[in-house]
Image (tube, helix red, strand yellow):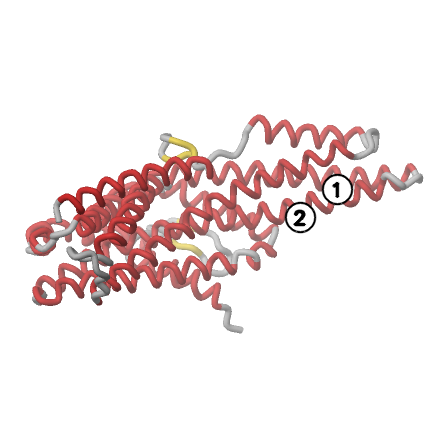
Amino acid sequence: MFDPIKWILRMVYFYSRLLGVINFEIDMKTGRASVTRRASIYAGVVNGLILSLLPFLSLSNLLQTMWSHAGLLHEYLFLVIYVTRVSCLVITLCSRWWQRGRLIHLVNAFSRLAFRRPQVMRMWRRRVVLKFMSIFLSEISQVAISFYPMRSYLTLKLTFSILMLYAMTALVNVIISHFYFINVNVHSHYILLNQEIQAVLSELRSLETEHRRATRMIKCCFLADQLEDIARTQSELQTLLKRSARIFDIQGLCITVIMYLSMIATIYFTFVGLTSTNRTLNWSFSNILFLFEVAFYFADILVTMDNLYIVLDVHAEMVTLLAQFSTLAPGLDERLEMVYESFQLQLARNPLQVCLFYLYKVERAKAVAIASSIVSNSLVLVQYEVQNT
């Protein structure tokens, strides 16, 4: 039976292999990753070809043409975003080689977790489809906005240069999708763990009215084992999330810069693109196309960033659920209380934190400060446009 989710995941995997982003192989049946000579040689050749394109692009007239016809500030911001994505790509391709062992260990660890809890694969379906659609619309709109404004200056060499630049920058979305899928895994596992904690709580509440000591002892022993397994899985998930953050920290920094510039460009373009010198609406096809491109690209960034926040949300929900154990009747079982206290101590001693390149923690509260900075900088650009019009 055709499964669109498996088709999307396999397409991303083979597309990553084709572009040399993944320099190892993954068994489609077992999900195990391993280093092979074939994958290493192919990825090395493709990475070398991609890096060799950079001097060709610098010598071509692509960048000169783009800069010579960049008459508005939002076009300069658009170029800066492209340069940031290319820089992210170069650093990532190089780092994938010395971090290959860590990445393989990460893939195998998540494969083992999915094998232990296969129901998790049904829980990430909506998130996978959402990310696929956001990437697809964003990439299609970027291709359109890359060619349409320069249609009068296109030559065969310039067209080839634009396609190469687009291919290299599109690789960044593939790289980010890998980290996105890791977070989807962690989020889905956390949801399952929270459901299991709720089931344990319900069982313990039902034992408060159980007067048969032997039955209560047996059930408490079983629930203690179950809670201990939940605590062990949570610790493993948190460790894997921290490892993935260290592997993808440079990409996280780049996507934050890209998101910041894109949001500033969105606000600035809303003013410049929809008004002309006489302050009348200017709905040209180029402006509408650019507006769609920014909207889809911004939507893709929101989907990616929200995937980080929901992991923090389900972790906070787990802490809240564990706090409900204190409302149960005391003295149910000594071992169960020890396991519960150990689990609480584990969460208190090692809280879940997602750090961006050791610069700051990813939190919803930080989004307010970033939004304030974006609005302030956008107003500066708008004032500059008004004064120089």
- The residue closer to the viewer here, 298 or 185, is 298
Most distant residue in the bottom direction: 1
Element type at marker 1? helix
- The residue closer to the viewer here, 365 or 169, is 365
- Crowd rating for badge 2 (residues with CA inside 10 Å; few <14, some 14–19, many 20+): some
- In this view of the protein, can residue 97 be seen by the observer? no
Q: Residue at x 28, y 53 (%)?
A: 43
Element type at marker 2? helix
Q: Residue at x 62, y 39 (%)?
A: 318
Q: Is residue 226 above or below residue 11?
A: above
Label 1 vs 2, first from the N-terminus: 2
- Crowd rating for badge 1 (residues with CA inside 10 Å; few <14, some 14–19, many 20+): some
Q: Give x and y (percent) for residue 215.
A: 88, 42
- In this view of the protein, can residue 67 be seen by the observer? yes
Q: Residue at x 36, y 43 (%)?
A: 100
- The residue closer to the viewer here, 76 or 61, is 76
Residue linked to disc 1: 201
Most distant residue in the right direction: 212
In the displayed structure image, the side of residue 226 where residue 141 appears, left or right: left
Q: Give x and y (percent) for residue 295.
A: 33, 57
Q: Give x and y (percent) for residue 314.
A: 57, 43
- The residue closer to the viewer here, 245 or 279, is 279
Which of the numbered marks, if any, corresponds to residue 195?
2
Spatial CA distance of label 1 from label 2 is 10 Å
Mark 1 belongs to which amino acid? Answer: Leu
The image quadrant that residue 17 belongs to is bottom left
In the displayed structure image, the side of residue 171 where residue 343 appears, left or right: right
Image label count: 2
Q: Give x and y (percent) for residue 198.
A: 70, 45
Mark 2 belongs to which amino acid? Answer: Gln
